[in-house]
Amino acid sequence: MKIQATQSVQLPLLGIVDTLQIRVNPFNLFPTYIEVVWTVSGEGISREGTLILPQDIINAWGTDDTIVKNYVLQQLGLVEEVEPTPTEEEVIEEPIIETPIEEEVVEPTPTEETPPTE
């Protein structure tokens, strides 16, 4: 995952980070808030801290962790750089190599209608 800072960075990163780790601290069965520990790192950059997930994020959080990731990215002023899916024109296909098939030459066999040559 490649992550870049947006214009409204709350934490001066002074570079591009390419790793985001989010660890969730233990919480009760029906929490009113959840604390997460985040770490971002890149070339010569490493920062970490904690964030509190608000109730609306907790309520929306199901089996997909994307909502938590997106919330943390937003709070840190970061956006995920997504690689675009290549179009058909951009997909490089391997060239098709045709190999000629040699035809077998069959000599005609003499029949009764064709007299033998002398």
Image (cartoon, rainbow, N blue to C red):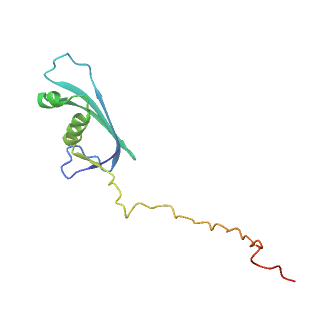
- The front one of 116 and 92 is 116
Q: Is residue 46 shown to the viewer in this render? A: no
Q: Which residue is most to the bottom?
A: 118
Q: How many dots with numbers?
A: 0
- Residue 16 on image: x %, y %: 33, 50
Quarter of the figure with residue 98: bottom right
Q: Is residue 10 left or right of residue 93?
A: left
Q: Which residue is most to the front?
A: 112
Residue at 67% x, 68% y is 102
Query: Measured along the vertical axis of the image, is residue 71 above or below residue 98?
Result: above
Q: Which residue is most to the top?
A: 28
Q: Is residue 118 left or right of residue 66?
A: right
- Residue 79 on image: x %, y %: 25, 47
Residue at 22% x, 39% y is 70
Residue at 25% x, 28% y is 63
Q: Is residue 66 shown to the viewer in this render? A: yes
Q: Is residue 57 left or right of residue 46?
A: left
- Residue 65 on image: x %, y %: 26, 33
- The front one of 83 and 100 is 100
- The front one of 47 and 92 is 92
- Residue 22 on image: x %, y %: 30, 32
Quarter of the figure with residue 41: top left
Quarter of the figure with residue 10: top left
Of the 4 image quadrants, the one containing the N terminus is top left
Of the 4 image quadrants, the one containing the C terminus is bottom right
